[in-house]
Image (cartoon, rainbow, N blue to C red):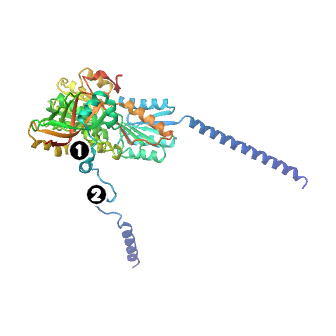
Amino acid sequence: MKKYISISVISLLAVIALYNSVYFAKLDAKKVEEGIKNFDPAEKANYFWNNKLDEALKSAIDLKLFDSQLADNPESLIRQHGKAIGITSTYYLLVKGFAKQVTPGSEEIPVEVPDGYANYNLRTKYIFGNAARDATGFFKIDDFENTMDFNAVATELNKLILERVIPRLDSLSPGETIKFIGALEINSENITKQISIIPLEIEAAR
Amino acid sequence: MTQKKPVLGIINRTRNITFIISILITCLILSSCSSLDKSNDKVKKIAVVISTLNNPWFVVLGETAKQRAEELGYEVVILDSQNNPSKETEHFDNIIASGFKAVLFNPTDAKGSVVNVKAAQKAGIPVFCMDREIDANNLAVSQILSDNYSGCVLLGQYFVKKLNGKGTYVEILGLIGDNNTWNRSKGFHSVVDNYPDLKMVAQQTGEFDRNKAMEVMESMLQVHPNIHAVFCGNDAMAMGAYQAVRAAGKADKIMIFGFDGAADVVDAIRDGKIEATGMQFPKTMAKTAAEYADRHIKGERDFSQKVPVAVELVTKENVGNYIAYGKAN
């Protein structure tokens, strides 16, 4: 009898000790519970695009004005409108202007600035780099846990341009006038006369 | 009774003398401790912890940080982690125990090194990361890093231009746990993957090591003898890949692209052996880290968490503007 009582007591103590010490839970649920969430660059880029882009584009300067300031006083142009991150001579700016549609599907559309200092083209096929991310000044590197996340947002923004902006050109016939707002980069130590613009907004200028 | 009084007097006098001597010794000890503190205040120590000194690029990073910190008046010790996180932890344990005022840190692993920076922060020792980052905000005071992604966007564009947008290639990655590895690879692919006629047929790690990359390249060439190019995550691996390609008699058929701006690769670009590299500026990063540490020790607290340093494309066309690890002028 004593033996059974001892076994029962030991078993009860063992059950109490082991209760809830091992259990199974879904990893995703646990992460949410603990506030750990995988960074989603697409979500970040979409939020910006849907909620902040229009406001950001208001700071774009006229391409003619950009061109004349680039010729006359690039330091002042960069000081007033350029955005940069870290130790660099590369600056990003937002510009707006007009161009004429060429054959749909072309790699780029030339942008004419009468008596312009530099040559410009609107990139319409291969979209890469950080211009779209950095020209608006919305994204701050210190808000990101690491640079990979920060760079992933640049990639996602470029995808959004390919998905939402470039296809608008398909409905335009060659020769039609396009109104655009875009991002460009210049290097203060090596200002070239061939400048590419990444379009952030395109519409027919009717 | 009368006989005992002188004895007691002698004992009391002895006690008084002992007491006075004790006070004098205590004062002497306190005074010497205080002068020791003053001497420590005079020469503050900074530790420079480098992931590996087995790569000349990191030697330049470490030596420049040391030199700049010494110029600013600090006593500096360089510690080599030998690409080993445990070794790195040992260094941090010693740094925390030895009264260093700051650490200029080149981590071995973005995630694995977080614990060391956390320990230093807990001990009140500010850490400034150089070139390699840790996956955490608000632990290191500041992280001064190459803008690897943008640098490889430039390299990717040049790669496409040299291959006319078509051909097959292989990629030799750096250390899998290092963010620089992926920032470089992703920057490169953000451009190159837009061109469907450019096909990557193999991708393997060379661990940022010349010999390892040479072995990897040798095996890749056995499986893919007709590739047109190889993209390497650093210059040491580019040189290893070049050795393998040359040994296979294909040096004039396979284009090699690196990243770093190391001395031998700058020379190799000039000689037409390697096509291009991304020039990082280790001296700028190291000097900035040392200057930030000095300003922090002097009381400044307003630092950006991450400071990217621009990378420039070096090709045969502009190699005259560059020397190893920086610009020519």
Q: Is residue A131 above or below residue B254?
A: below
Camera-nearest residue between A60 and B85: A60
- Identify the amino acid type marked 1: Leu
- Identify the amino acid type marked 2: Leu
Instruction: Indicate which label's residue lies in the foreground, 2 or 1.
Output: 1
Horizontal side of B134 relative to B172 (left or right) equals right
Rendering coords of residue A65 (x, y %): 26, 33
Q: Residue furthest right?
A: B2
- Report which residue position mark 2 lands on: A27
Image quadrant assignment for residue B160 = top left
Rendering coords of residue B291 (x, y %): 45, 34
x 21%, y 24%: residue:
B246
Tell me the chain of label 1. A
Badge 2: residue crowd in 10 Å (few <14, some 14–19, many ≥20): few
Tell me the chain of label 2. A
Image quadrant assignment for residue B313 = top left
Q: Secondary structure at mark 1?
A: helix
Rendering coords of residue A27 (x, y %): 28, 57
Q: Is residue A9 above or below residue B194?
A: below
**Mark sitting on residue A157:** 1
x 70%, y 42%: residue:
B25
Q: Is residue B211 visible?
A: no
